[in-house]
Image (tube, grey):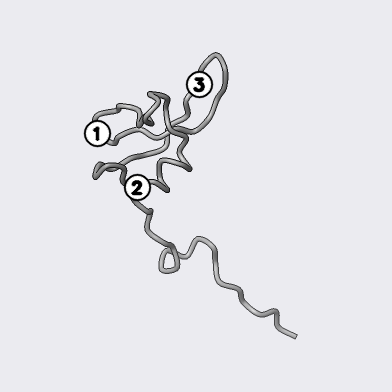
Amino acid sequence: MAKAKTASKNNPTTRESAKEYFHDGKKIKPVKLISEQSTFFAAEYDGSGELVVGSDGAALPWARAKSLG
């Protein structure tokens, strides 16, 4: 019996393109933020390099920033 062929996970025709996320109309990207208190993925404006901050002035976690966009 011949073994059935499976599709390659590296097949370029089946790959999705990367998703773009926006916050306040500007493109954002994830960055790893390391502080004395914690380490987490935050959001940064693509191009300027400024952190995306909330109304309290603290850096927004990536999951929250991309869902608010």
Closer to the N terminus: mark 3 or mark 2? Answer: 3
Closer to us: 14 or 38: 38
Q: Position of residue 18 (x, y in %)?
A: 38, 53
Residue placed under numbered mark 1 in the picture: 47
Within-10-Å neighbours for mark 3: few <14, some 14–19, many 20+: few
Q: Earlier in the sequence, mark 1 or mark 3?
A: 3
Query: What's the CA distance linking mark 3 and mark 2?
Result: 23 Å
* Image x and y of residue 30, in percent: 42, 37
The residue type indicated by label 3 comes to Ile
Q: Residue furthest right?
A: 1
Asked where in the image residue 38 lies, by quadrant, the reply is top right
- Picture disc at residue 34: 3
Give how far apart the Cα atoms at labels 1 and 3 are: 20 Å
At label 2, which amino acid type do we have? Gly
Query: Quick check: 31 left or right of 27?
Result: right
Across and down, in percent, residue 57 comes to 38, 23
Which of label 3 and label 2 is nearer to you?
2
Between residues 47 and 52, which one lies in front from this camera angle?
52
Q: Residue at x 24, y 45 (%)?
A: 25
- Residue placed at 49% from the left, 33% from the top? 41
